[in-house]
Amino acid sequence: MSVWRGQDMTLDDSLVREKLLQFLLNEGALYVLLLDNQGTVLDASRYALELYGEDPRGRPFSEMTPDFSRHDDPRDFLKDLARVPQGLTISCGENLPQTVQVRLLDLGDQGWILLGEFPVEELVNLQESLTSLNAEAANLNRELYKKNAELKKLNDLKNQFVGMAAHDLRNPISAIFSLSSFLLDNSVDALNQDQYELLDMIKASSNFMLRLLDDLLTLARIEMGKLNLDIEPVEVPQFLRKIVRVNQILADQREVALRLVACDELPPLACDPLKIEQVLNNLISNAVKFSPRGETVDIAALRGADQVVFTVSDRGPGVPEKDRSKLFKAFAKISVQLPENATSTGLGLSIAQKIVLGHLGTIWYEPRHGGGSSFCFSLPLTPVIPPKDSLDPILLQGEQGGGSSPPDDR
């Protein structure tokens, strides 16, 4: 009996071979199949099982490779493989097929042992290709990072320019608005009808320009991360009633009623009251603007599981489905015609969305049952102020925002 002599170890050769075979079949990356005389898979190595993606035992080996299709009798093909190793395409479950060099050991009446070897050159080439692709991807990532940094710089410059231009234009336009208002209020007897109408047009145009400049300044601050949120507890019922009273004065001019239809019992809501008032003013003024005379705008605040949902609903024409994806984009135009004598800067809903997102809330549109629109937004009951970089470009630190006069900007 031959033995293998190690330091303090003496093992039977048959035991060594058995253990070595089991180790290679269970732990090695070897594609090994045991086939019977008919070419049916009796057993497979662990690696072959993983590569095939399912248990092939009990299935004909011919189903595991399309190369058998060239032969009428699979056994003849197996005999050819036993004489001359060949490259076969092996199915690999849901992954791409693999090409292996197959060697076959004929066991006579006991069948065959199939050993599949992956070509070393092909593996080396594949590894080199993967290394090259990884290097190319790393270069593209660096280039993308560089381009993103350049775009951010250009965007910041754009916002600075818009902010400076809007700020510099605001003073002279404000003077035009104030002077035209003064003349209209104090020189009525000295003006003929044409002069009065001309001054009224100047006042309306300058007022629109002031609102546009204010919106541009607000949007520029937000995108530059300079819109500060002064979070404090707010009693929602009193807060809403005050907003409804203020907006009712403007709604009366269009003969539209405002109605607070629901306001659940709520704990104090942590938010920036001026900014949320700006959001509500925008939604209410839009609802009033698009409501027919004599209609009512409904306002509600309802409690959810962990949030408060504010809703402003009107009986206007609604928003066509094709335009809904553009509602919260700056300067987006929709197919709904503005009512007579109504104006829009195209920025109000975009600003409202950014303010709500800054509070970690959500804003959306819903068509109202029976016709009309419902604009809703939710704010979390438990305040969670995100870190400075988490809402880029909607950041929460920096310069304090402006006031909350009702806009007119769907």
Image (tube, rainbow, N blue to C red):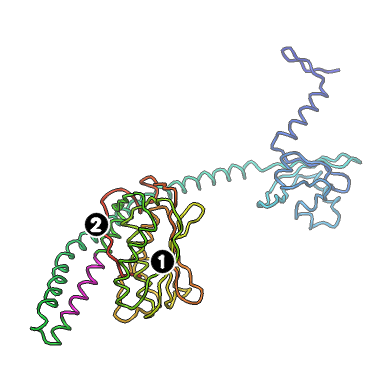
Q: Where is residue 24 in the image (x, y as percent from the top left)?
A: 73, 32
> Residue 189's image quarter?
bottom left
- For label 1, the SS is strand
Q: Residues within 10 Å of mark 1 (few under 14, many from 20)?
A: some
- The first of marks 1 and 2 along the sequence is 2
Left or right position of 225 against 334:
left
Task: Report how far apart the C-alphas of labels 1 and 2 lie in the structure.
Answer: 40 Å
How many tags in the picture?
2
- Check residue 260 in the rendering and tell me which mark sits there, or answer none: 1
In depth, the one of 124 and 364 nearer the eye is 364
Q: In which quarter of the image is residue 352?
A: bottom left
- Residue 143 appears in the picture as rendered: no
Would residue 147 be counted in the magenta stretch? no
Question: In this picture, which residue range is highlighted in magenta?
Answer: 199-213
Q: What element carries label 2?
A: helix
Q: Which of 178 and 47 is in front in this view?
A: 178
* Amino acid type for the residue under numbered disc 1: Leu
Where is residue 245? Give x, y as percent.
32, 66
For image coordinates 51% across by 53% down, the residue present is 305
Kind of residue indicated by mark 2 = Gln
- Which residue in the structure is indicated by mark 2? 160
Q: Is residue 120 left or right of residue 25?
A: left
- Quarter containing the N terminus: top right
Q: In this view, does 236 lie to the left or right of 68?
A: left
Q: For the point 39% across and 77% down, which residue is it?
A: 291
Locate the C terminus and report the quarter of the image it occupies.
Answer: bottom left
Residue most toward the top?
Answer: 8
Depth-wise, is mark 1 or mark 2 nearer the camera?
1
- Whole-percent x, y for residue 329 in the image: 38, 66
Answer whether residue 95 is visible to the viewer in this image. yes
Image coordinates for residue 281, horizontal then vertical, percent:
33, 65
